[in-house]
């Protein structure tokens, strides 16, 4: 298919009750995001909001009780609305963020019934995200069967990791059955890997530790533009403590809680995913901004534990690459929280990291000082753009 100024792609990131979307309009190799929005309250009181690039409200509508507004109806509405606001461009496909692509998918794929059935089999591996991703794909297919859809996986970028980075020390047959380290946030890391040579050409072949610190947080070792290790494993609960997730936890704790507290799988899942992390340690909030402003010593402890674990993982990931040439911060906390970056930087002083206070406070692109042995960068991530680029490529545009 020929990409022209008239081609547009819809990018969808679907959650349990909300769906974020962007429309990218293509000119040459770099498409532009022209509309961003979301549908929230799916299943209860749906609301549709859309903004243009200047963040001006283009639409804001709600559905009342008794109005037929299931997922397929809402996606049908979304598509019709987009087509009315494309200024003559033609929607050529929808690209979806799909959390799990299993052991086989190392790149995005065009979705057909076979692919959908295969992704359905991965639901038990990502029960909190995969069903919602697939529900949006199915709803869109029901509303507009003619629109091609592309799945872009959060696991794909990590599929080229060396086997030892992907393998648990479990009996072999379990690894073969798919109990292995997949890694997530791959679309974000792939975007950063793509940006690195533009930010600093010497980093194209370098060994870079990337810290994706959002409400979900993980880190990745990128060597020569490829993922070689990451902190998230079989699920997105491994690695760093997050807003409400534990991060890495001695598995013996789970056995203990099952025996001593009678906790079952559902109770453990709630504990690990929703009651722990910054929220659990502080007892106050899962939001880093709130904790940094709080006078409560438990808030300070939650921040300290978070920074300690980021620094510790940086050392581990540097070891996976046999060294480190640069450190990158990205996502909500990584892009905007100078105190967290400063604290992590102090803990990595042994590596020669020296953060420049003024540059850090200004959220500058380069925040290391002239005396730093390795550069430290802040690079905003853009998973939606990565999905748009993948979708255009799969469509041959
Ligand atoms: P998600 O993982 O949901 O995509 P984001 O990458 O948007 O999340 O990150 C959201 C988190 O970023 C918030 O929970 C908040 O803790 C944190 N955050 C956003 N802005 C700031 C800031 N100025 N200072 C500290 N933390 C911030």
Image: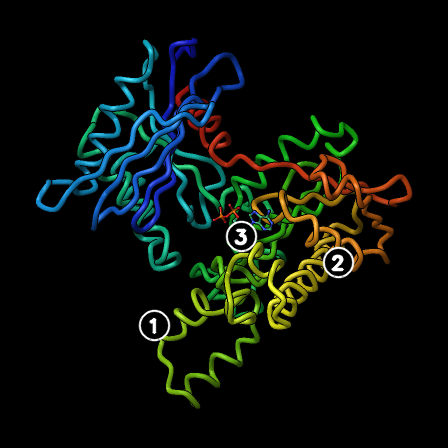
Quadrant containing the N terminus is top left
Q: Residue under circle 2?
A: 315
Quadrant containing the C terminus is top left
Q: Nearer the viewer, residue 252 or 168?
A: 252
Q: Nearer the viewer, mark 3 or mark 2?
A: 2
Residue 28 lies, with reference to residue 238, above or below; the image says above
Residue occupying the far front of the picture: 295
Dot 1 or dot 2: first in sequence order is: 1
Residue 35, by quadrant, is top left
Task: Answer with left or right where residue 34 lies relative to residue 81.
Answer: right
Residue 135 lies, with reference to residue 243, above or below; the image says above
Q: Residue at x 26, y 25 (%)?
A: 147
Q: Residue at x 30, y 39 (%)?
A: 39
Locate residue 50, reporting x and y percent: 34, 30
Give the Cα separation between the discs numbered 3 and 2. Answer: 18 Å
Residue 75, by quadrant, is top left
Q: Residue at x 38, y 18 (%)?
A: 8
Q: Residue under circle 1?
A: 266
Locate residue 2, reporting x and y percent: 41, 10
Q: Which mark is residue 183?
A: 3
């Amino acid at each position: 298919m020929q990409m022209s100024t008239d081609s547009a792609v819809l990018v969808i990131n679907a959650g349990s009750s909300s769906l974020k979307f962007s429309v990218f309009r293509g000119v040459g190799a770099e498409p532009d995001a022209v509309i961003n929005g979301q549908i929230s309250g799916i299943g209860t009181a749906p609301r549709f909001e859309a903004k243009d690039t200047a963040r001006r409200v283009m639409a804001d509508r709600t559905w009342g009780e008794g109005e037929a507004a299931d997922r397929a109806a809402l996606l049908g509405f979304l598509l019709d609305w987009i087509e009315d606001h494309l200024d003559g461009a033609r929607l050529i496909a929808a690209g979806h963020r799909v959390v799990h692509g299993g052991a086989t998918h190392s790149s995005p794929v065009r979705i057909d019934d076979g692919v959908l059935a295969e992704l359905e089999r991965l639901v038990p591996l990502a029960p909190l995200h995969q069903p919602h991703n697939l529900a949006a794909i199915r709803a869109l297919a029901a509303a507009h069967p003619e629109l091609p859809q592309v799945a872009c996986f959060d696991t794909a970028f990590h599929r080229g990791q060396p086997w030892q980075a992907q393998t648990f020390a479990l009996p072999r047959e379990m690894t073969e059955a798919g109990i292995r380290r997949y890694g997530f946030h791959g679309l974000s890391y792939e975007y950063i890997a793509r940006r690195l040579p533009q930010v600093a050409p010497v980093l194209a072949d370098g060994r870079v530790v990337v810290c994706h610190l959002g409400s979900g947080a993980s880190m990745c070792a990128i060597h020569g533009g490829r993922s070689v290790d990451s902190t998230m494993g079989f699920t997105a609960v491994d690695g760093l403590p997050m807003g409400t997730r534990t991060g890495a936890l001695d598995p013996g704790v789970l056995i203990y809680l099952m025996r001593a507290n009678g906790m079952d799988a559902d109770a453990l899942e709630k504990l690990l995913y929703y009651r722990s992390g910054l929220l659990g340690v502080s007892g106050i909030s899962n939001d880093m901004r709130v904790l940094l402003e709080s006078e409560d010593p438990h808030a300070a402890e939650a921040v300290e534990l978070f920074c300690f674990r980021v620094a510790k993982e940086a050392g581990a990931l540097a070891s996976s690459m046999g060294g480190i040439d640069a450190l990158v911060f990205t996502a909500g906390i990584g892009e905007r929280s100078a105190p967290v970056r400063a604290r992590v930087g102090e803990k990595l002083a042994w590596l020669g990291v020296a953060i420049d206070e003024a540059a850090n406070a200004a959220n500058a692109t380069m925040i290391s000082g002239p005396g730093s042995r390795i550069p430290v960068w802040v690079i905003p991530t853009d998973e939606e753009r990565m999905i748009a680029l993948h979708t255009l490529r799969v469509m041959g545009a």
